[in-house]
Structures are given as structure tokens and as C-alpha cells.
Amino acid sequence: MKAQVEFVTLESNGIASTSPELLTTDNPAANQGQNYEGGEANVAGPGERDDDSSVTEIESEPLIEDRPEEVQVFSFAQILSAIFGSFVHGANDVSNAVGPVVGLWLVAISGNPLESAPPPIWILFYGGVGISIGLWVWGRKVMETVGSDLTTITPSSGVCIEVGSAVTVLIASNLGIPISTTHCKVGSVVCVGRFRAKSNVNWRLFINIVIAWVVTLPVSAGLSALIMYAFTRTQPLLSTP
């Protein structure tokens, strides 16, 4: 079997010309990449040649990475920023968690939930222990989602994420405004990841997280109202006179 191929030659005037030649081999693959007097053989058969070979592929957006010296510096700084983030997390989220408990405590000691009184230390300790246990039992899944599934995080970007979200939560805590540390953290992760490269963010996962934020508000409100309704129906003392 003889395979017909084309040879591309360069003339002295710089214009390329083609001329058909015959290769006397039964294995066209053996001729691939060989140089001939007239030029280099293209032994691709029908349907084997890439029609889009002349189209230049669009290079993806480059991803900003840390240099080795930056990794050494920011690896230690990230530990400090994580400690700072944990501090402000306790200042805001523990307060959100134990807020209803403080209300119950005020009712128990004075009968007036609107009375202003500093909560005892044991209530704060109770909230801190509860959050720590929850982190130990179920926190790994959330950490994997935010820390690796949503975007890739380097030491320098991790410091930016921790400091940015922690400062935001700290300001809100100082003003007495209950906000979500999770919202601040996820927003920081997405923005920093987008700054490094657009393709570095799992946008589908981010959309699912936002949908979960929107859905959980009415779900938690409705579930709490349903539980309260059940209590008032079964416990006459809880009913409003």
C-alpha cells in the first residue's frame, strides 16, 4: 500500500509550493517526522489531520502563586491570623449562640427578660464548649468546603482572608451588631480567589452556598415558630393569657 503525501518546499523567493510524492512504505506511521529533500512529510491520513490546528488556543488566565520566600513568611503569619480569626469568632458567634440562654437566665433570676445584666461566665463557657465540640464533630466538612473546594488558598491569600474577615467581624462585634462570621469568611475567600484568577473559584459551589443562606433563614424561622406553637398547645403555662 502506498500513501500519497505532500511535501512543502521553500523557494528562493520565500513562497511555499507543494508537490505530491509517493512513499514506498506500507507503514505511513514509520515516515512521520522524517525529513526529505523536498521538505517534511505529512503522513496524516484522511480524517486524521486536525482541522483546528491553525487556530491558536486561548491561554487561561495565569494564577498568582506564592514564591518560596513568601511561603516561609506567610506560613507563620497565617497561624497568627487564624488565632486572630478564632478570637473574633468567639466574640461574635458565641454571643449569637448563647443569647437566648442569657434571656432564659434573666427570666429565671428576675422574671424580666428585658432586664440588662452582664451574663455569668459559666454561660459564656457553656457556649464556647458547645462550639468547640461542634467544630470537632462536624467542622471538618465545612472546613474542606471553604478551605479547598471553593478555591485554592496559599499562605499569603490565607492571611488576607483571615485578616479581612476578622477585622469586619471585630468592628461589628464592637458595635454590638450580630453578623455571620461564615458570610464574611466565604466572601473573603471568593474575592481573594477571584483576584488570583477567575478560574480559581468554584462558582457553582458558591452559588449553592448563597442559595443555602437564603433558604435557611425562612426554614429556621418557620421551624422555630412551629416548635413554639407546639409548646403553647401542649403546655398551658406557656400560652399568652
Image (cartoon, rainbow, N blue to C red):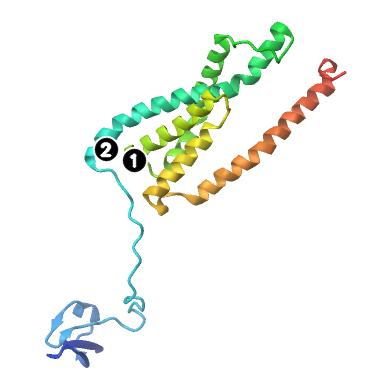
Q: Is residue 150 visible?
A: no
Q: Residue at x 51, y 22 (%)?
A: 91
Quick one: SS at disc 1? loop
- Identify the mark at residue 170; answer none if there is no mark: none
Q: Is residue 219 among what the camera can see? A: yes
> Earlier along the polypeptide chain: callout 2 or callout 1?
2
In this picture, is 239 found above or below 181? above
- Counting from the top left corner in percent of width and height, residue 100 is at 65, 20
> Mark 2 — residue?
71
Report which quarter residue 107 is drawn in.
Answer: top right
> On the rendered image, what quadrant is the C terminus found in?
top right
Q: Nearer the viewer, residue 144 or 238?
A: 238
Which image quadrant for residue 109?
top right
Please name the amino acid that badge 2 sits on: Val
Q: Residues within 10 Å of mark 2 (few under 14, many from 20)?
A: some
Question: In terms of secondary structure, where does tag 2 sit?
Answer: helix
Q: Nearer the viewer, residue 10 or 65?
A: 65
**Image side of residue 156 versus residue 179, left or right:** left
Residue lying at the far top of the rendered structure: 109
Q: Quadrant of residue 59?
A: bottom left
Q: Which mark is residue 154?
A: 1
Marks 2 and 1 close (CB-CB < 8 Å): yes
Instruction: Please state the horizontal and vertical placement of residue 115, each as a whole percent of the image.
Output: 69, 12
| Circle 1: residue type | Thr
What residue lies at 71% left-to-right and 9% top-to-bottom? 108
Image point 38% across, 37% down: which residue? Answer: 160
194 in relation to 122, above or below: below
Asked if residue 171 lies left or right of residue 49, the reply is right
